[in-house]
Amino acid sequence: MALHQHELAFIFGILGNIISFMVFLAPMPTFYLIYKKKTAEGFQSYPYVVALFSCMLWIYYALIKNDATLLLITINSFGIFVEVIYVSIFLFYAPKKLRLATIKLLLLLNVFGFGAMLLSTLYLSHGNTRYQIIQWIRLVVDISDFGAPLLIIRKVIKTRSVEYMPCTLSMFLTANAVMWFFYGLFLKDYFIAVANTLGFLIGMVQMVLYVMYRNARKASGSGGSSALIFLVLVLSGNISVE
């Protein structure tokens, strides 16, 4: 018996939840390193503050949809829980200057920014207009999330080496984009589909680069370990790729 579109959306949503769950846990090595060093000096908090904002926005987006989906709410509720823990650990171990900068960013983005967006869409817009405003904000935030993968692609092209691009994790993130693309497609939520199309394309570029450069230069020592460390540092804002 053929599956209906909503049933297919549910299946891809479940798969997306499973993969996203593991993606949310990917920064754990960063915070283990912070815990061992007993300091967050040298790291940046903005990836986690932005991720927290992103999860908050996703939940609001899901709640105002006419066909509010539990799958978006559950995974992003978990995301909020995890990101709050990450930010709390960061604040606990951050030096004073970095702690104040993080608090300012939290207030600016997650309190005043989200609050202003919430009030304006609740009281100054109605119906489909409100929904479209959130869609566009959501799309902009999603596109901004592709910054770290693009930095890694640039590094690979410049060095002609995949030492700093772990293939397994790249495949993992690409699969995540594919799951949520089909979820959005079958729900006819084309903003979700478009955002994850970009994620899929970036992932495919990474796969092509891996095939092109995997034998170009061998890393001295443990390449997989170096790649993971590099990715963690990029995602945590602790390294710039030039």
Image (spheres, rainbow, N blue to C red):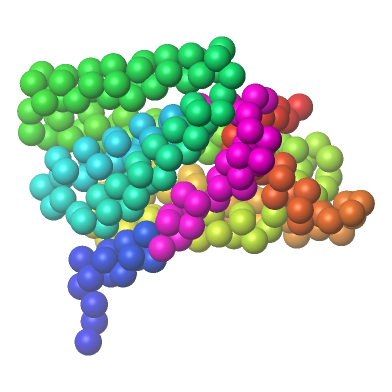
Task: Pick whichever, 137 or 60, lies toward us.
Answer: 60
Find residue 104 and report its image quarter.
top left
Residue 23 forms part of the magenta stretch: yes
Direction from residue 78 to residue 47 in the image, left or right: right
Q: Estimate the x, y position of residue 61 in percent, counting from the top left.
A: 23, 40
Instruction: Count numbered badges in the picture.
Output: 0
Task: Pick whichever, 26 or 12, lies toward us.
Answer: 26
Q: Residue at x 8, y 21 (%)?
A: 123
Q: Is residue 109 depicted above or below 18 in this figure?
A: above
Q: Estimate the x, y position of residue 45 in percent, counting from the top left.
A: 52, 28
Direction from residue 52 to residue 112 in the image, left or right: left
Q: Estimate the x, y position of residue 13 in percent, counting from the top left.
A: 32, 61
Q: Which residues are magenta?
A: 18-46
Q: Residue at x 30, y 47 (%)?
A: 77
Q: Residue at x 20, y 54 (%)?
A: 69
Quadrant containing the N terminus in the rendered view: bottom left
- Return the residue found at the far bottom: 1
Find residue 63 and report its image quarter.
top left
Task: Pick whichever, 83 or 127, lies toward us.
Answer: 83
Q: Residue at x 78, y 48 (%)?
A: 226
Q: Estimate the x, y position of residue 137 in percent, counting from the top left.
A: 32, 29
